[in-house]
Image: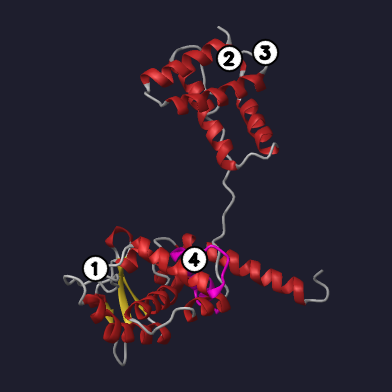
Amino acid sequence: MRAGDLAEQFLRHTALERGRSANTVAAYRRDVERWIDFLGPRPLTDVTPVDVADYLARLSGEGLAATSVTRMLSTIRSFHRFLVAEGFVESDPTGAVDAPKKPMRLPKALTIDQVSDLLDATAVDSPVGLRDRALLELMYATGARVSEVVSLAVDDVRLDETNDVITLTGKGNKQRIVPVGRFARDALATYLVRGRPALLAKGKGTPALFLGARGGALSRQNVFLIIRAAAERAGITAHVSPHTLRHSCATHLLRGGADIRVVQELLGHASVSTTQIYTLITRDALTEAYRTAHPRAR
């Protein structure tokens, strides 16, 4: 049977028996037709893993992103598994071929000066301003996730003469106690005394640490908007999000000489391998500084 006819059977199977949407079937059709066009007159029974690898290499050479190449491999893998299941071919040539690795995307960190500008751009002349300053200082000081920050309760904060810490509840409801630096401590203390009571009076009462203008718990979306507004006031044109402050905290700690295990514990990473991505950033910064400064580096 011709490859084109087999492809039509596969697409019908995808639409009728697997219940895929019309858009998904159309995408499968484009991928399968492109694969068959690459094979030319060669029968599908003769296709080898080398052919599949060559095809992926061609796609990559054409400038397609790794995610697109991976999607196309997934399509032709489904196609060949269908052919095996229906008895049209004896083996699946895609089984031994791995998808291309996605390029590692290094997180974007702000410079120390940019963080200072971001924090200083928040006025502290109102309860909302005091809240925003405490929120931003805390997120940069601890590297907390936005979900961890909005779930904080007043009782999770312990500020005293010997031990300034907060208790964060991370993924899997795992709790960790992290220290709070002087700037974040002062901002939190001021917010708890002068800012939060004024906001709390507008609502029905909640144990949440950070409150909205109507007295209810602050939402994740509120945090995004607060950070975006602060970045605009500070003249920072780069995209800034809660995760940006988390990345910046980790990057600046490592550049300052902090042990990677300490940063892992602070961020609540289950594995140190997750934290190691930040060492690539600091290494890149070191390389760039070396190339700029050393007379024989260029």
Colouring method of the image = secondary structure
Q: Which of marks 1 and 2 is in front?
A: 1
| Residue 9 sits above or below residue 118 on the image | above
User: Could you say which quadrant of the image residue 112 lies in?
Assistant: bottom right
The residues bearing labels 3 and 1 have C-alpha atoms spaced at a distance of: 67 Å
Q: Callout 1: helix, strand or loop?
A: loop
Query: Label 3: which residue?
Result: 41
Q: Callout 2: helix, strand or loop?
A: helix
Instruction: Tell me what residue is drawn at x 44 percent, y 68 percent.
Output: 227
Query: Label 4: which residue?
Result: 244
**Mark 1 and mark 2 residues within 8 Å of each other at the beta carbon:** no
- Residue furthest to the bottom in view is 161
- Report the magenta residues as a range: 234-259
Q: Callout 3: helix, strand or loop?
A: loop
Query: Label 2: which residue?
Result: 45
Where is the N terminus found, in terms of image quarters?
top right
- Residue furthest to the top in view is 1
Q: Nearer the viewer, mark 2 or mark 4?
A: 4
The residues bearing labels 2 and 4 have C-alpha atoms spaced at a distance of: 51 Å
The residues bearing labels 4 and 1 have C-alpha atoms spaced at a distance of: 25 Å
Q: Which of marks 3 and 4 is in front?
A: 4
Instruction: Tell me what residue is drawn at x 48 percent, y 64 percent.
Output: 275
| Residue 22 sits above or below residue 148 on the image | above
**Mark 2 and mark 4 residues within 8 Å of each other at the beta carbon:** no
Mark 4 vs 1, N-terminal side: 1
Mark 3 vs 1, N-terminal side: 3
